[in-house]
């Protein structure tokens, strides 16, 4: 049915899938652009001189970054290491270190080294991600030279992007008018206002939204996406990519708000111990979209009448892979958030999200905030839903 179309086009990629799919490599048009070329002075640990001529990183979107360095050294170089960090939310700062092959070029101890980061083996990065990098060069007398830190932005170089910024949202697009882009930005900002008014949830950190004009263009920005994917929220990066054009504008606005709400929920609750239950994460995103779509409502009412409902406990784990069953889970999740916000108010929802942020268990967070656990929530929600949708018990 048309009303459910969006779920075939939607995937929330909270993490990046790590799987080598080298066969896809040839399908991508790879363009390289050099960014961040520069001489670096760095730090030297002895009188022996190592002079860096060029240190640079080239973006091969969406699959690779090529780092290279050219330098001279008084003494033969024995070890070259590249270090890099990816800017994203995380509780542990990860510095990747790679030992590089050294090529000697000509005379005067002029040498070069490079490292090719093939993301088909590590998982990709969303567009706009900043990567910081530096080198450690060691000669045969153990003199070490550490270069200054440089950065490169992993841009989708296939398109000429326009941008618009308001509040914490920056929208990037390359096709369509300014009015088209503004209408999407307005939808996103209004979605945030509605979400905050009802649930207290709001953005703490900036979000970048990349609007692709076609499905093929958007899939070209992802390494391992299914061909039904219509958008993705890379919450830890604060990045959303989505396929919206004039033909699917209304779907696009709702889906953009849905994905944005996932980033808000992530920012409100991320902690090293636990993630929020799926029903709350999806329920908040469905709720942010606005009134429950009529198609979902029909499914919810039928399940209330037949008693074929999911328990809150079961919806704390990933939803069913059976699309028909997952529709009911999305509808029920919406209704649970509707119940909690309409009956207990915004302040309690803020308290619930804050409790999750401190790594509380699913039952523990509900008990602490509302005085009932997951089973208690199910029972009290059920009476609310029977009444709201006019189903007699
Ligand atoms: Zn979702």
Image: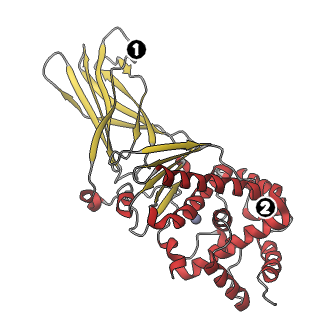
Q: Where residue 154 appears, x then y in whole percent?
A: 40, 42
In the image, residue 205 above or below residue 38: below
- In which quadrant is the C terminus drawn? bottom right
Please give the residue where the numbered disc 2 appears in the rendered image.
364
User: Viewer-proximal residue, 115 or 140?
Assistant: 115
Q: Where residue 333 appears, x then y in whole percent?
A: 68, 71
In the image, residue 275 above or below residue 48: below
Residue beneath the point at 54% across and 51% down = 182
Residue beneath the point at 79% across and 75% down = 381
Mark closer to the observer (2, 1):
2
Residue most toward the top?
47
User: Viewer-proximal residue, 125 or 227?
Assistant: 227
The tag earlier along the polypeptide, 2 or 1, is 1
125 displayed left or right of 28:
right
Mark 1 and ligand 1: say if the CB distance to the nearest ligand atom is below 8 Å: no
What whole-number distance in Å separates the C-alpha atoms at marks 2 and 1? 54 Å
Residue most toward the right?
371
For disc 1, the neighbor class at 10 Å (few under 14, some 14 to 19, many from 20) is few
Q: The residue tagged with tag 2: helix, strand or loop?
A: helix
In the image, residue 213 above or below residue 159: below
Please give the residue where the numbered disc 1 appears in the rendered image.
45
Residue beneath the point at 63% across and 66% down = 282
Q: Where residue 107 appears, x then y in whole percent?
A: 13, 18
């Amino acid at each position: 049915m048309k009303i459910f179309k969006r779920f075939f086009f939607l995937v929330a990629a909270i993490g990046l899938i790590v799987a080598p799919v080298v066969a896809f490599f040839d399908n991508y048009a790879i363009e390289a652009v050099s960014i961040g070329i520069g001489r670096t002075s760095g730090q030297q640990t002895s009188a022996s001189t190592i002079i860096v001529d060029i240190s640079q990183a080239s973006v091969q979107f969406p699959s690779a970054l090529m780092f290279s360095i050219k330098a001279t050294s008084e003494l033969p170089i024995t070890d070259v290491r590249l270090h890099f960090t990816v800017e994203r939310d995380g509780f542990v700062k990860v510095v990747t270190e790679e030992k590089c092959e050294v090529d000697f070029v000509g005379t005067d101890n002029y040498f070069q080294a490079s490292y090719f980061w093939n993301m088909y083996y590590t998982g990709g990065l969303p567009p706009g991600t900043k990567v910081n990098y530096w080198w450690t060069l060691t000669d045969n007398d153990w003199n070490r030279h550490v270069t200054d830190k440089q950065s490169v932005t992993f841009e989708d170089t296939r398109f000429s992007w326009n941008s618009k910024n308001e509040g914490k949202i920056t929208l990037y697009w390359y096709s369509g008018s300014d009015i088209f882009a503004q209408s999407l930005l307005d939808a996103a900002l209004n979605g945030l206002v509605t979400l905050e008014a009802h649930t207290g949830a709001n953005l703490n950190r900036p979000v970048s939204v990349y609007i692709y004009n076609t499905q093929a263009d958007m899939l070209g920005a992802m390494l391992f996406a299914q061909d039904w994917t219509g958008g993705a929220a890379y919450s830890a990066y604060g990045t959303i990519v989505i396929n919206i054009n004039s033909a699917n504008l209304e779907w696009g606005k709702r889906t953009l708000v849905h994905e944005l709400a996932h980033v808000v929920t992530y920012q409100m609750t991320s902690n090293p111990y636990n993630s929020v239950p799926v029903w709350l994460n999806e329920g908040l995103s469905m709720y942010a979209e606005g009134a429950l779509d009529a198609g979902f409502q029909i499914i919810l009412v039928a399940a209330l009448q037949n008693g074929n409902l999911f328990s809150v406990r079961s919806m704390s784990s990933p939803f069913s892979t059976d699309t028909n069953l997952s529709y009911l889970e999305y509808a029920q999740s919406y209704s649970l958030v509707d119940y909690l916000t309409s009956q207990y108010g915004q302040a309690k929802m803020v308290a619930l999200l804050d409790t999750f942020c401190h790594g509380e268990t699913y039952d523990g967070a509900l008990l602490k905030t509302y005085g009932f656990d997951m089973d208690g929530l199910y029972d009290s929600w059920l009476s609310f839903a029977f009444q709201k949708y006019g189903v007699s018990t």
